[in-house]
Image (tube, rainbow, N blue to C red):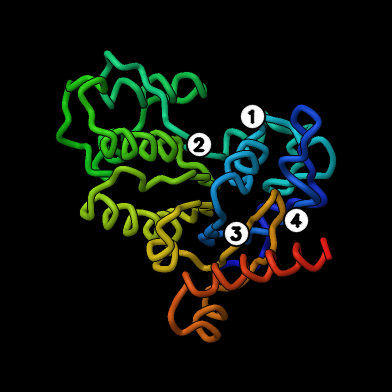
Amino acid sequence: MSNSPIIQVRHVTKVVQQKEIITSCHLTINENSIYGLLGPNGAGKTTLFKLLTGYIHATTGTIEMLGMDIATERNNIIKNIGSMIETPVFYEHLSATQNINIHLSYMGLEPNNIPLYLEMVGLHQTGNQPVSEFSMGMRQRLGVARAIAHQPKILILDEPINGLDPMGIRLMRQLFTTLTKDHRMTILISSHILSEIEQVADTIGVISNGTILEEVNLDSIKSKFPNGLEDYFFNVLKGEQSNDTSDEA
């Protein structure tokens, strides 16, 4: 794992309809690492992911990806990012291969090794089956395959193991490790299944009320919280609630 930052978020705020969704947010992700972003529902995880991919723009602050400012160089950055944010949308009447083909064409790339990426997510036997017949878990797998098909340097995945059965979850866990080790990808991932994040992540970030509360190396967490990531996560949130109560007093 490199110690060189590939994503840097500084003083970022996002205001929507006069409400701060992201507040003075700071985040650092090192190259060739797996960063697990944890937070309760409504904490701002999805909004932060949309900011990082340039789908929405920060109200204040700076976001640098690959050494470039996303506010001015989004087109250059987005070529190097694969993402799956919220529920993936597909052309329902087309097959998995055809959907990825269209995605690559949209990016100005020639179809290359699509069967390989489908095999990596366990969809290599779907053939001409239309996506309309896919289960939720199959759709999640296809969303990941589409996100990695152009071999991005950064992969941003919002709840990628939602709807997967135990075999699918295990496959994804192995895939994320392979992508960082063999394909040199940097992965930012969110999940409510803390045990899965614990098995793949190098670094943990905890977000609540639109702010990153802590960024900690997973090894450090394990040494202080032998019962695991869940204990650490709730300890951080409990500390924030205590601070909120103190502020109100």
Residue that badge 3 annotates: 31
- Local packing at callout 3 (Cα closer than 10 Å; few below 14, some 14-19, many 20+) is many
- Local packing at callout 1 (Cα closer than 10 Å; few below 14, some 14-19, many 20+) is few
Is residue 209 rendered to the left or right of residue 23? left
Which quadrant would residue 142 be assigned to in this image? top left
Residue that badge 4 annotates: 26
Frontmost of labels 3 and 4 is: 4
Which residue: 62% across, 69% down? 238
Q: Position of residue 37 (x, y in %)?
A: 56, 56
113 or 38, which is in the foreground?
38
- Local packing at callout 4 (Cα closer than 10 Å; few below 14, some 14-19, many 20+) is some
Q: Earlier in the sequence, mark 3 or mark 1?
A: 3
Q: Amino acid at mark 4?
A: His
Is residue 5 rendered to the left or right of residue 127? right
* Callout 4: SS: strand
* Callout 3: SS: loop
Frontmost of labels 3 and 2 is: 2
Q: Position of residue 50 (x, y in %)?
A: 62, 36
The residues tagged by marks 3 and 4 sit, at their Cα atoms, a distance apart of 17 Å
Q: Position of residue 191 (x, y in %)?
A: 45, 53
